[in-house]
Amino acid sequence: MGVVCKPYMPYLVANIDSFGSPMSENLKESYRLVETGLQRKHDDGTTTCDLCLWKCKLKHGQRGFCQAHVNRHGTLYNLSYGVISAIDIGPIEDKPVKHYQPGTKVMSVGSYGCNFRCGGCHNLDISWGVTALDDLAKGQSKAAWVPPEDLVTAALKHGVQGIAFTYSEPAVWLEYVIDVSRLAHEAGLYTVYVSNSFVTDEALELMAPYVDVLCSDIKSLSDDFYHDICPTAKVEQVLGSIKKAQELGIHVETRTNIIPTKNDDINELREIAQWIAGNLGKDSPWHITRFFPAYKLSDLPPTPSDIMQAAYAAAQDVGLQNSYVYDDKGCDCAESNLPVAEYLEGDPDKLNATLQCAASCCGDEGVLLKKYE
Ligand code: SF4
Ligand code: SF4
């Protein structure tokens, strides 16, 4: 065993309980690696991450598939705690969420990293975040670092009623999501979690007391579709996570982005509507969004209106009462956001200072991260 890090312990681990707590004081100091809340340490120094259903088993120096987690000397750390890639403010209906506090506004935030690799992702720099996370690993990042209480303060200052975690996959910075959400609840704000739902039951159980709304993709009912974007993912795992979230008391709304030739079979779309009606309830909201060409799927056309309308009609047929079609909406992207500093108080130079872990226990080897193999 080599050097033992003594990093900041987030709420999940330290169980600290209010504003102005040791957590806040500690975090105000500076960026650092944060021990993840769901991990199994093995005698051989490997660690299994139990945050998402990849369940990466990592050796010292290895990063998980999401690129945001690293094993250092047998302990798993999150690189991206408090690192914000994008912020925006808008109606909760834009997430899309229509049946939870309609007419209110949310501050949406994202970090870097995702456990999927969708061919049509519009958010590559943020969602996959490979370059940004490499920079963090090398101690060269100038990304915005925002302690939980500063984010909640910014949300209150801008008069929003909620905070949404979106753009990247929130499961891969769950410790920050929970710390912010807890403070947000204390301040009277609700929280929204926009996810692909490839997440473990343990992670859902941890977040359930602090997350009010899950807006989840149901991308397809085909294992082949999921296999293309995540070799280990199965439809039943994703559906099981969505159902579990609702059982845990989280308000759930689902979304299907219809991609021509990929998931536009009307029988499959009908089956999605049937699954929602049968498992989440006939009043459970389903959002049908349009695909816009991007990345590896740039050669496909935008989704024709007729298949979106056909999906809506199929939902009506099976008794789903709250389906919505969006001609102008695809993923919840972050492309046109203002710079993060526009929403936060304080010295912009400090906000974007070079991020090097303040624990300084890695020595000359640095954080030393190998990418997922
Ligand atoms: S992809 Fe990331 S969040 Fe998922 S199990 Fe691997 S390290 Fe954990
Ligand atoms: S579309 Fe969503 S789930 Fe897929 S890679 Fe992008 S952020 Fe991840």
Image (cartoon, helix red, strand yellow):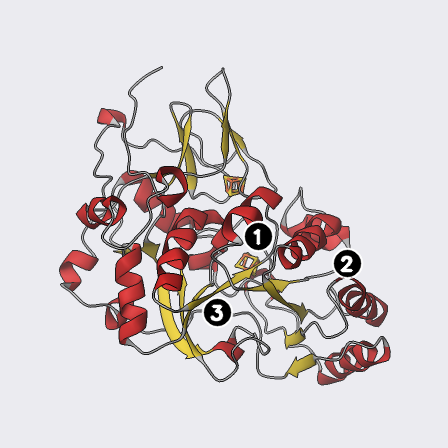
Q: Residue at x 75, y 83 (%)?
A: 309
Residue carrying label 1: 117
Distance between the alpha carbons at the discs numbered 2 and 1 = 17 Å
**Type of amino acid under label 1:** Arg
Q: Residue at x 81, y 81 (%)?
A: 316
Residue 103 in the image: x percent, y percent? 48, 85
Residue carrying label 3: 333
**Type of amino acid under label 2:** Leu
The tag on residue 221 is 2
Cβ(mark 1) to ligand 2 < 8 Å? yes
Q: Residue at x 57, y 51 (%)?
A: 116
Residue 13 in the image: x percent, y percent? 39, 38
Q: Earlier in the sequence, mark 2 or mark 1?
A: 1
Q: Earlier in the sequence, mark 2 or mark 3?
A: 2
* Residue 172 showing in the rendered view: yes
Give yes or no for contact between labels 3 and 1 (Cβ–Cβ under 8 Å).
Answer: no
**Type of amino acid under label 3:** Cys
